[in-house]
Every structure is written in structure tokens, then in C-alpha cells.
Image (cartoon, rainbow, N blue to C red):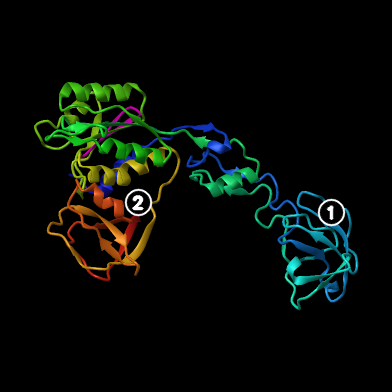
Amino acid sequence: MILFEKAYNIVMDSAFFSGSEHIDIINSLNRVLAQDILSDMDMPPFDKSAVDGYACRKEDLNNELEIIEIISAGKAPEKTILKNQCSKIMTGAMMPKGADSAIMIEDTEIIDNKKIKYLKDKVKVNICYKGEDFKSGVIVLKKGTVIKPQHIAVLASVGCARPLVSKKIKVAIIPTGDELVEPKEKPTISQIRNSNAYLLLSNVEKISAIPNYVGIAKDSKESIFKMISKALSDNNDIILLTGGVSMGDYDYVPEIMKKLNIKILFDSIATQPGRPTVFGVRENQFIFGLPGNPVSSFVQFELLVKPLIYKMMGHNYKPLNIKLPMGIEYNRKRSTRKSWLPVYINEQGRIIPLDYHGSAHINAFTSADGLISIPIGETTLKKGEIVNVRQI
């Protein structure tokens, strides 16, 4: 059994880059940029009005101003603003020459439909100046960025219609166990519905990798061998098995992995839940044997599999951690492993551990805001103690 930190380093040091491809911007959400994105122009590309109003000279605002033209967005001004003149202007429209401010319509009075009078004492410029957001040639998005809607807006604004992104990682999922039936089936007295596969499929899809459901492997060497062999031959980058990794009579996964020339790098981690997690490598393919209980699979996917997938796609994944005080005291009996607990944040901004019955109790996680960890050797988290909450 190795420390979690060592297991994490082994997994991450094994990663390789998945490669890259150009895709249409409309399909780029949640993909990882494989290049720095540079601006091809200043933004804004010209001085523009930040309001609907009138472009004018500040020095003339005590006087009546003659309206000499109307400037709509997308229209270039035709006239220069001279003494006691203004142009009616729309938000986002180009400022005319001679003007040094844009006053708001609601701060003016119209006189004879040809002139206006400014009604305020103070003057705001209300101009978005050329290049104030970014200049031509600067990096606007960095390589390794996971593309969100706001990033897509930036890509569009600099003309990057086909960004270069990392290729998706293909992940095979194989739950094991004679007791498993699919969700549409009614379990018999000795069966349970297969939740692990759908838990992992959705987690994989959530981070823009490609989930590949191979099917349920029975508790036999032949079935597990066949399923893993199929996943390897289908060119999956990562294979996730659940169950069959502990010390039971039918826990064949580590044995079959060795038979398939998969080099096992570790087979037990000093963490709870998830102690009997197995990790192996065969050439450029990675295989995880995750525990059969769904909480263990969920937590170990979050802690080990997710960072590996992101690293292979060129993203340096850093989970969001926030520091908050414990709302109650929490105690555990054993401290030989690093423990991960589901928690929620109450209205006072304090951390409350959820009522959690063990690694089969996935329902507890439906109300979880995050995970907190208790280091090896510690049994108590005191009320008011500051803890790191890992967002999930």
C-alpha cells in the first residue's frame, strides 16, 4: 500500500500528450487549446461610444449643441465635430473626429429637434478607447486553457474560427460482477443495478473526453480477459474497470492485467475510500482497476483519472479548493489512511460533513458541495478549524 501522493505522482508522470487537431469554433466548448491565441487586431478596433447619446466636445457642454448627423453602430462618421456641435450616436458606434466625450440621452433636453442641451454638471467620457481591451499581436488565450463560453467569444473576436485543440481521450468503461444488471432491468434478490458504468461515463463526458461503454464483465477470468482485450484492441487511451480488484475469490482483475502484459505500477493506496485501486500501463494505454463501490469509483476518478485525462489533453488541472471553517467537530476511529469525506456548505459558510454510511452510499454525494481530506494520523477535525474544500 503506497501513499496517495506517491500514487498521484506515478499516474501523472506516466501521461503523454494526446496530439492536436483544428476544429470549428462552434464545437470547441470544453476542449483544451493546443496553441496560444494571438489577437489579429486592436480591441476595440476604434474609439467607440459606451452609451446611446451624443458625441460632443466637453468644453461646449454649457452651450446648446447642434445635431449634425446620426451615427449608428457599423456606420463610419462622415462629419467632424466642431464648436457647439454634436452627433447623435448609438452604443458601440465609432466616435467622430473632434469629439472627446459621449453624453447619455437621458441627461439631455432636445430643442427644436435640431439642438440639445446638457442637463448635468459633471461629465463622464463614456468612450471605449481603441485597444484598451487588448492590442494586436498580444496573447489573449493561453495554450492549455479549457475553453468556456467566454473564451469562445474571445476566439470569435480575434477571428480564430478553427482553433487548434488537443485531441479527445478515449476512455473505455468495464464494470465487473455477476450481480450487476442494467438500469432498465429489475434486479433479482441477489442482484443490483449497474450504476458505476453510468457514473464513469458521465464523468468522462463532462470533461470532454470520449466515453466507450464496453459492457459488464462477468466474474470469470474468461469474461474479464475478453473485455479488457477488446478495450485494448479498440485503441482506447484509458480503460476503467470497476470491481474485481480486492482480495475476494473472484477478484481476477490484477491477475488478468498481468496476463495481458499490463505492467502494474501500484495495486493499493493508503486512502479511504479507494484502497484497492490498481493502475497499470501497456505501451501507450493506461488501465485503472477501481473498487466496485460507487463512492470509491467516484472519488478515485476525481483524484486520479480526471487529472490524468486533462494532462493528456494538455491542461494543468488544478481543482478548485476553498478554505472554510468546520461547522461541527468530526471524529473518525481509524487514521491509517488518508480519508476523503463529502461535505456541504451551510448558510453561514461553514463545513458540515454529510451523513455518509460508507463507500456504497453514493446518494450522499447528491447533496455534496465538495470533499475534505483528513491526513494519515489525524482522527479529529475541530469545530472552527479551517479546512480545504475540494469542489466536485
Say which residue appears at 33% left-offset and 66% top-offset: 324
- The total of numbered circles placed on residues is 2
Vertical arrangement, residue 224 with respect to residue 208, above or below = above
Please give the label number shown on residue 77. 1
Q: Quadrant of residue 245?
A: top left
Q: Which residue is label 2 attached to?
A: 392
| Amino acid under disc 1 | Pro
Our reading of the magenta stretch's main secondary structure is strand
- Label 2 to label 1: alpha-carbon separation: 52 Å
Q: Quadrant of residue 287?
A: top left
As for residue 202 lying within the magenta part, the answer is: no
Q: Nearer the viewer, residue 131 or 93?
A: 93
Residue 58 percent location from the top left of the image: 81, 71
Vertical arrangement, residue 333 with respect to residue 20, above or below = below
Mark 1 element type? loop
Q: Residues within 10 Å of mark 2 (few under 14, many from 20)?
A: some
Residue 116 percent location from the top left of the image: 84, 69
Q: Residues within 10 Å of mark 1 (few under 14, many from 20)?
A: some
Q: Quadrant location of the N terminus?
A: top left
| Amino acid under disc 2 | Ile
As for residue 290 lying within the magenta part, the answer is: yes
Relative placement, left or right, of 143 versus 110 is left
Residue 65 percent location from the top left of the image: 87, 69
Say which residue appears at 65% left-offset and 56% top-offset: 133
Q: Nearer the viewer, residue 60 or 151?
A: 60
Q: Which residues are magenta?
A: 279-291
